[in-house]
Image (tube, coloured by chain):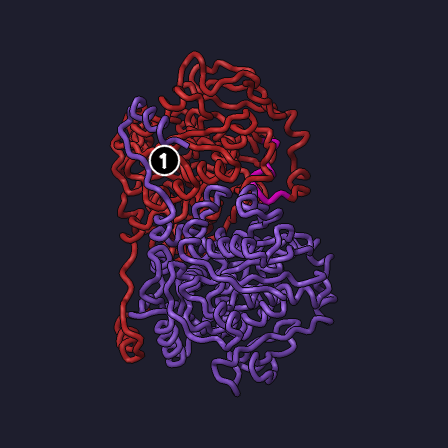
Chain colours: A red, B purple
Amino acid sequence: MVLEMSQFVKSYECTLCHKTYHPSQNIMTCSNCGEQGILMIEYDYEKMKKVVNQAYFENNKDQSMWRYLPLMSIEGKFHERLLKIGFTPLYQANRFHQRIGLNKLFIKDESTNPSQSLKDRASAVAVLKALEMNQDTIACSSTGNAASSLACHAARMGLKTYIFVPKRAPLGKLTQLLIYGANVIQVDGDYRSAFKLSKDAINHYGWYNRNAAINPHLVEGKKTVALEIAEQLNFKPTDWVVVSVGDGCTIAGVYQGFYDLKMLGLIEKIPKLLGVQSEGCAPFVIAHQTKKPLIETNELTIADSIAVGIPRNPVKALRAVIESKGNWISVSDQDIIYTMAKLGKDEGIFAEPAASASFAGLEKAIRLNIIDKNESVTVIHTGNGLKDLDNAQKAIKQPIVMKADLALFNEYYQTKGE
Amino acid sequence: MVLEMSQFVKSYECTLCHKTYHPSQNIMTCSNCGEQGILMIEYDYEKMKKVVNQAYFENNKDQSMWRYLPLMSIEGKFHERLLKIGFTPLYQANRFHQRIGLNKLFIKDESTNPSQSLKDRASAVAVLKALEMNQDTIACSSTGNAASSLACHAARMGLKTYIFVPKRAPLGKLTQLLIYGANVIQVDGDYRSAFKLSKDAINHYGWYNRNAAINPHLVEGKKTVALEIAEQLNFKPTDWVVVSVGDGCTIAGVYQGFYDLKMLGLIEKIPKLLGVQSEGCAPFVIAHQTKKPLIETNELTIADSIAVGIPRNPVKALRAVIESKGNWISVSDQDIIYTMAKLGKDEGIFAEPAASASFAGLEKAIRLNIIDKNESVTVIHTGNGLKDLDNAQKAIKQPIVMKADLALFNEYYQTKGE
């Protein structure tokens, strides 16, 4: 089996030892460095420029992530049979920015993707790659969203899935998996245990691997969110882009997208990236603060999507923040819950904990003068709150229950109505 | 307060006594017939034709329901500040059609709207109308989706909401309401009780009324789903369109959309409409079978969104099916659950019970030769399964739980893997 070359892929390069590989080589990670040696995909931007320019975007009628196909490491065969992913709305905030003292805030709403998270972008790439390679089974470990998105798109395309989730996966995500007909293995342990068993099983059975920190093509799916943000802002992206971070693959993808556009001369500068973690699981923030290599942490947070004690993509994620001149910040579970309610009330947006974390991180960054109120900001709303109702309960008051009697209602209205 | 005239509205006409009203009159229902006298909005199609034609659609870059603004009874001021509603994907089925023995099936996916249901279309119209009329509070009763969509869009636009739900509303929908900051009154009783208290309170406080069976503009929001289906199929809609029915407002809206396009000469014929109800609450199906007026039924079904014992919009809904030469059908809760799992597995689509009902209804209609396998069909997927996880549990098997040990996994794989 040979990986097909996409039009503009020049080589694969190891993020650790910088060894390069010809794109026709059938590899996932560096043969020198083993599974730590995650590959970067290198493009021939001079060649790409001739196709991908302002005119390309103006004339492109595809309203999905596949409008960016020439910027990706995938042929994209069969993509028209997928559910519609990407080209999600970019909203200007109506009120939340005022609450946190910011002049200009945009919200990239990934919660309207088919399985209601940003992860659909990466899973779709994995599913198409598996099909291109004639594989009939695809597997991954995930804290939840990568899993449910993979199960969703694999079902649509008729692939079998084996999905390894940690025991804490929220009911919403677990239910999605099972409805989509995945073979679900709930690993008695945390994400680390799920990752280990998935790796062993994938090696044993030779399934296609959707683990984002192994498979170099998945970042290429995730980067389309940055391409869209830039295009939706007429190639003048905001000063900052805020995203919550678990494994590190999403922030790496966001950086890669802006990097591509910079190399193509389509944007002038790459936005500063603010990586947000949860205080109970903040290995990147600790590494940044202590200026030491990443060390393993516990996974003690309600934000399951970013509860990753050993991030699998440290090099790319750390580099994304450094090279963009960005920053790292952590927020408490209490901040996450508080922000979830405020976001619902101000904008009609229902964010799952990990998504709410990025908004909470923005608020804290403004308070700490990391972000100035006159700088423009885009926050990526990564996943829908319906996926985790248990934690949402912590953000809301209970409804009033009464008989159908106007006198009773009047009494409530006079004392409690808002 | 005077209702603003939209460009092409000719008059309002009572569905019962046919009395007409000038659109500048500030009314919701017919002054002769009371609240039973729901109004229809009559358009000047000859005048509309000059603006709304093939060229209008070809040149329209708006990728939301507001591309149809000239066909609606609303000015649409402020619509750019709303979350993005409509222009949802229309998918051709990859596999489900084969399972049920049909040649050509399209799925209109309304579950990717901002609050994950079709009801966003009507709620957005209500919110804009309230703003146009300078009202600061809006209220409704709802089995769930109308409520959560109203709360969502009202929050985004800074309006207060009072929402009356029956006690059975599923946790997902209830949580959405509370996250969006609505004042939620859970009425100790069924939908009928919730409807009654909302009516009394709205009359008492003079709030803007979003009850779809009272407010004539809401059907105009719902009809945009039919406009989209037609446009997405190049104005050659399928032979049938299938939709589940509760109050009757959605099927009335679907009919109205196709009717408009017929009157404008943009489509040749109106698709036959198949109205699907749940066996435990099927007043329309019973009225159709017995050829007698609609009588009140119980509300004994898991499909909460269509569990409406006294439909509030019987005239428009019955007429929609008769005039389209369509039909009515009912399905069991067991059919709904079974279909939910099959749809997830075949298409990667997770439908709430009321949405699954429409697919189950299609299957039954084919079995009963109401729909021929060579006829083309569009099913409207009205709401996301994440809204009702309790009922989804009935459709799935439990995941396997194991330690992170490949030997244990191998054992599972050999006996249970699929």
Q: Is residue A63 a member of the stretch shown in magenta?
A: yes
* Prevalent SS, magenta region: helix
Amino acid found under the numbered disc labelled 1: Val
State the residue in front, B190 or A403.
B190
* Residue A369 visible from this viewpoint: no
Q: Which corner quadrant holds the C terminus of chain A?
A: bottom left
Vertical arrangement, residue B142 with respect to residue B392, above or below = below
Q: Residue at x 58, y 72 (%)?
A: B319
Highlighted range, magenta: A62-71
Tell me the crowding category of disc 1: few under 14, some 14 to 19, or many 20 or more residues within 10 angstroms, Cα based: many
Q: Residue at x 54, y 16 (%)?
A: A25
Q: Position of residue B159 (x, y in %)?
A: 42, 66
Q: Residue at x 41, y 27 (%)?
A: A213
Q: Position of residue B176 (x, y in %)?
A: 37, 57
A132 left or right, relative to B281: right
Q: Residue furthest front?
A: B368
Residue that numbered label 1 is attached to: A184
* Residue A48 visible from this viewpoint: yes
Q: Is residue A41 a member of the stretch shown in magenta?
A: no
Element on which disc 1 rests:
strand
Vertical arrangement, residue A278 with respect to residue A205, above or below = below
Instruction: Tell me the quarter of the picture where residue B263 sits.
Output: bottom right
Q: Residue at x 60, y 64 (%)?
A: B326
